[in-house]
Amino acid sequence: MSKRLAVMLTLLLSCLIARCDAATVALWLFDEQVGVYPSCVLGDAASGNFPLVIGPGGQIVEGQFGNALEPVGRPRVDYPQPLDFDDSAKRGQFGLIALDKAKQDLNWHNAMFCALMTRGDHHLRQEVGFGSPTESSLNLGANNWTVEFWYQPTRPSERSGVVFEIGSGPRDSGHPITRLSLNQDAQSFTLLNEPSNTRMRIESSAAALDASQPRWHHLAFVYDTIDQQVRHYVDGILQKPPKSCQLKPLPVGENDYMSIGRDGHWQHRLPGRLDELRFSDAQVYQNDFAPPPSFSKYGSGYSPPTLKRGLPLLFGENDQPEEPVQLGSRKHLFFDDALIAELENVEFRSNPPRLAELVINQRGISNHLVVFEDVASGDGLIRLYRSGPNRSLDVWTSRDGVHFTAPDLGRDFRGARNVVVEDPVGLGTVFVDPNASVDERIKYFSGYRGRGCYVYSSADGYHFTRNETSALPFRAASQSLVFYDDQRQKYVGYHRSDMARTEGGKSARTSVMTETTDLMRPWPLTPVSQAEQSRLSKTRKLGRKNPYYVDNGPLTPPGFGVEYPTVFASEKSLDPVGVDVYVPKCVKYEWADDAYLAFPLMYFHYH
């Protein structure tokens, strides 16, 4: 072996070891839907501990891999008057007014952040569960670290532009910060670390930062605590090293925050797009390297699975058969008159329900249950999934459907050993995905905390893994129902919306329907503009908040609105006044084609 080859292999091995040893602290892929509303969550694809919320000062746009984040504003919005609450505290909670005008509390009128994580701003509704940037390895200073991202310049620099700012908080308080900024000269960066009184210029590549040539480039910043040196790489090539520095972490703050794309005052916007921003608690790169491919499972080389195709639908929405329907070898569930030309002295009657056996008698059991049988496994068990400790998902099993026990899965969560998903969920559906690989064949779809709706995958239904990005960005108000429809080759979902109103002005619960052909990547979404909502409200009784996404304030995502078709709602000809469809409980009947059933839970506005 030549000496040169040996050196190259040694460098390659050391680089691979460094990458394997590095622990990813946070990874923001920014692959949420283009045009996603302000207050929706940008998920952390690493641990999930550090979600961001996108603000009116940022947008999801096309990226290097999938989508990206750009700190640009949105079309003007005339925020609604706070008429829905008599209590000023509640009006402040939803961000429609500033409770303390002298302090200018964060509200919709001044929330021009791009992407934000904050443990302050307690006057606002907060249901996302933000992590702490100062109590974690996001607090750059004491240890080795790497910050890397893909960057595309899109406009000339007006002044310095912020990549990220981390502060002990509260914002606007003068407490110390750590900040990385692109300088106005578009040839260098500045790293500001106030605890160590460091303000350091880092030379970069003028060509890579030139807005007249808007190409994507990989930028990495690596800190070595022993050498007290920051190294900067552009497309894997080491740049001129800055002066040495001894960085220090920020003091831990109970109101700490992290702002991406703008500073803590929502100024100094970055003049370009960010994709796949990753923080690691080690020196990922110690020598020149080839820029990494996408960190997403669904980046380079991914293609959606081939969808299982069932028989064509016989009874489409507009089908009015004039000739006899040829069933062939199909099984037909006889629950309506689709096959009948004339009826005389005959009526359909459903079998009356009977009082069934009590199968579980336990306090706190949720009414949103999923009964599931994994026929392919051959275990002969009926499984009942329900809400467990701390809104987790647990499972109970039975061989006869009457006597259920909690299986011991070999791990403990808050005193329970039958928990299959530890995340705060408990409002979803378990189903078999016939298009997935063996290790992902069982799916669970649910709202995850207040962060949106996620897909979880499992090989056996007892060990689930959360997908890296939300399927839908809306906060789940109740149980979502999802299944694969082989006759339409689509995954179909039904979700509660609270946007409609009763004649008395109260929330009228309805269900909207979503469809997708790629379960694992973010589902299709066409946002509704303020003007479009105004137009729709002329023919439908909708809530007064327009745009509807302001409903939960700038730090908590909205629920489902009118982005998707409404398919379940109360019927004046059938239902009493003041009754809503709480959850439709709909399924595609498994043992016959062309059969869809619903067992809706009705909500009464009175007792």
Image (cartoon, helix red, strand yellow):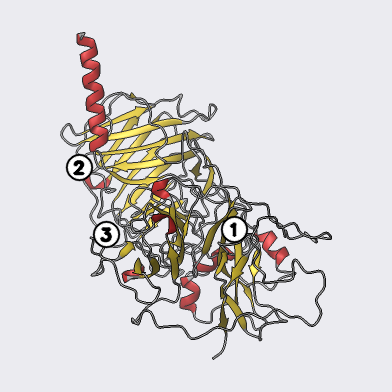
Compared to residue 135, the image places residue 561 above or below, namely: below
Q: What residue lies at 43% left-to-right and 39% top-to-bottom?
A: 160
Left or right of residue 209, residue 11 in this image:
left
SS at mark 1 in the image: strand
Question: What number is the disc on residue 514?
Answer: 1
Q: Nearer the viewer, mark 2 or mark 1?
A: 1
Q: In whole angstroms, how far apart are the C-alphas of marks 2 and 1?
A: 46 Å
SS at mark 2 in the image: loop
Residue 95 in sight: no
Question: What number is the disc on residue 143?
Answer: 2
Residues 371 and 601: in front is 371
Q: In whole angstroms, how far apart are the C-alphas of marks 3 and 2?
A: 19 Å
Residue 509 location in percent, x, y? 59, 74
SS at mark 3 in the image: loop
Which amino acid type is shown beneath numbered disc 3? Answer: Gly
Residue 578 location in percent, x, y? 63, 84
Residue 489 location in percent, x, y? 60, 50
Residues 255 and 2: in front is 2
For label 3, the residue is 253
Upstream in sequence: badge 1 or badge 3: 3
Upstream in sequence: badge 3 or badge 2: 2
Which amino acid type is shown beneath numbered disc 2? Answer: Asn
Upstream in sequence: badge 2 or badge 1: 2
Residues 524 and 89: in front is 524
Which amino acid type is shown beneath numbered disc 1? Answer: Thr
Residues 273 and 399: in front is 399
Residue 284 location in percent, x, y? 27, 34
Question: What number is the disc on residue 61?
Answer: none
